[in-house]
Image (spheres, helix red, strand yellow):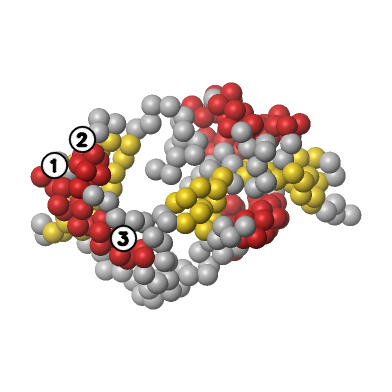
Amino acid sequence: MNVEIEIVPFREEHIPEILELWHRQYRLELKIGVLPNTWGLLKKEVEAFLRKQLSSEYSAVALRGGDLIGYMLFQVFPFHGEDTAFCPVVGHAEKSRKKVAERLYQHLSEKLVAKGVLSHCITYFAHDVDFEEAVFALGFGMIVIDVFRDVSPIQSRPGDVKIVRATKNNLANIKLLDEESRAYYLGAPIFLNRGSMNADYYRNLLNREDMAVFLAFVEEIPVGFMSVRRNKELRLIDLC
């Protein structure tokens, strides 16, 4: 017979099994060949991060017949103008992806919403299709995905796009694009308040040694930009 999944608080005794479960999940991703082996070696750093969450009410473990089959945790902090719950990529792992993830999130989301935390973010590896389908079905996409645009094909001519590394001469272009995107995100149906930045913020993007900004042009008109930063240390909670 099927044994029910039990959701219990995250305790120190669970850490060894959680570490093994997460590293097992990471090793599966390494087989795809697009991730570095680095995070698989940093067991002390991941363990230290997990230990900090022991006192959090927004962490839970899934058991089946006494065996640990998954865990999930959220950190809550102000983000884009409102309290936001964030689950980093080391903040969850599951043996049976869809069903366990659904039960864990059902349990934790109830606690978060009861405290007025309505914005939830979960990160996962790009090739983790099972987890992607699980969170998509929970509403991370299904609720508003058909509101942004219709399903007709988008005409694309990628050969017409020119991409260059931005310099201080592109400061006005970057600021204009960022302000336009801010207005877009603030509107329906997203309602994400990103806040406005001053000129010093954009200068800093272009002056940092650990960061590069790339601009895209179509017919000499700036249409988008992306910033890339290299971290010198493992920062598991970064939203970058």
Which label was assigned to residue 207?
A: 2
Asked if the residues shown at circle 3 and circle 1 are in contact, with their CB atoms under 8 angstroms apart, the answer is no
**Amino acid beneath label 2:** Asn
Q: Compute the Cα span from label 1 to label 2.
A: 8 Å
Which label was assigned to residue 181?
A: none
**Residue at 39% across / 43% down in the picture?**
240
**Amino acid beneath label 1:** Lys
**Residue at 28% across / 36% down in the picture?**
211
Judging by the rendered image, the residue that carries numbered circle 1 is 168
Q: Secondary structure at mark 1?
A: helix
Asked if 198 appears above or below 47 in the picture, the reply is below
Q: Compute the Cα span from label 3 to label 2.
A: 22 Å
Disc 1 crowd rating (10 Å Cα; few below 14, some 14-19, many 20+) is some
Q: Secondary structure at mark 3?
A: helix
**Residue 134 appears in which quarter of the rendering?**
bottom right
**Residue at 19% across / 57% down in the picture?**
176
Q: Compute the Cα span from label 3 to label 1.
A: 21 Å
Judging by the rendered image, the residue that carries numbered circle 3 is 182
Along the horizontal axis of the image, is 33 left or right of 176? right
| Image location of residue 3, percent across then percent down | 85, 52
**Amino acid beneath label 3:** Arg
Asked if 148 appears above or below 23 in the picture, the reply is below
**Residue at 47% across / 56% down in the picture?**
82
